[in-house]
Image (cartoon, helix red, strand yellow):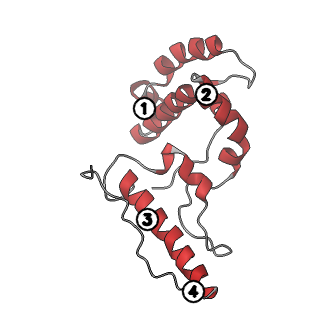
């Protein structure tokens, strides 16, 4: 499933970047009523598209209504919007995955050990990082032979 391009949280809520917290709250009180999946399906959107728009709205509110989250989002906004957040793979020009994409909770869905679950996504990432370290150590003749610790899973203490 291909995800749509990221939109600015302010754009999603229809607000300016210098808006007050109470403006965010007021807008969010009315937008879910207008953009609820049950209402949007009637406007020729598929249920999946309507649900995705509703989730995008909820995510924007969650980030912008929290002062710490909003400050972090504001300082990283360009990186978030203009980097490939859905790319977990190694690109042809680089042996290192785009690590910034893994700082967002949108890179995983749920907490399972398979598919796009948190444990699977981050376990794969750590395996790639470790493989890069091993390759570099071999090139430099450092002889790193230790196994990386396992990430764990849903049943781990």
Q: Are marks 4 and 2 in contact (CB under 8 Å)?
A: no
Image quadrant for the N terminus?
A: bottom left
The residue where tag 4 is placed is 138
Task: Determine the CA span between mark 2 and mark 3.
Answer: 29 Å
Question: Looking at the image, can residue 19 be seen?
Answer: yes
Which residue in the structure is indicated by mark 1?
Answer: 41
Please tell me which residue is depicted at 40% across the width and 75% down the height of the picture.
147
As helix, strand or loop, the secondary structure at mark 4 comes to helix
Check the image and report above or below for 136 versus 150. below
Where residue 68 is drawn, which disc sits there?
2
Label 1 SS: helix
Q: Residues within 10 Å of mark 3 (few under 14, many from 20)?
A: some
Residue under the point 53% across and 68% down: 129
Of badges 3 and 4, nearer the viewer stands: 4
35 or 110, which lies in front? 110
SS at badge 2? helix
Name the residue: 56% across, 60% down: 87
Describe the element under mark 3 as helix, strand or loop: helix
What is the x, y in percent for residue 156? 27, 52
State the CA–CA distance, disc 2 to disc 1: 34 Å
- Label 4 or label 2, whichever comes before in sequence order: 2
The x, y position of residue 26, in whole percent, is: 58, 11
Left or right? Give the position of 116 relative to 101.
left
* Nearest-to-viewer mark from 3 and 1: 3
How many residues crowd mark 1 within 10 Å: few (<14), some (14–19), many (20+)? some
The residue under label 3 is 124
Q: Residues within 10 Å of mark 4 (few under 14, many from 20)?
A: few
Q: Earlier in the sequence, mark 3 or mark 1?
A: 1
Q: Earlier in the sequence, mark 1 or mark 4?
A: 1
């Amino acid at each position: 499933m291909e995800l749509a391009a990221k939109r600015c949280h302010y754009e999603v809520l229809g607000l300016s970047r210098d808006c007050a917290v109470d403006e965010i709250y007021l807008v969010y009180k009315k937008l879910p009523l207008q953009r609820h999946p049950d209402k949007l399906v009637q406007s020729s959107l598929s249920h999946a598209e309507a649900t995705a728009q509703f989730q995008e709205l909820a995510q924007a509110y969650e980030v912008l209504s929290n002062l710490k989250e909003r400050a972090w989002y504001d300082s990283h906004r360009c990186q978030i919007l203009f980097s490939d957040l859905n790319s977990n793979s190694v690109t042809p020009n680089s042996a290192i995955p785009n690590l910034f994409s893994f700082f967002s909770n949108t890179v995983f869905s749920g907490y399972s050990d398979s598919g796009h679950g948190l444990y699977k996504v981050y376990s794969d990432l750590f395996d790639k990082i470790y493989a890069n370290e091993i390759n570099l150590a071999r090139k430099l003749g450092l002889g790193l032979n230790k196994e990386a610790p396992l990430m764990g899973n849903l049943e781990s203490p």
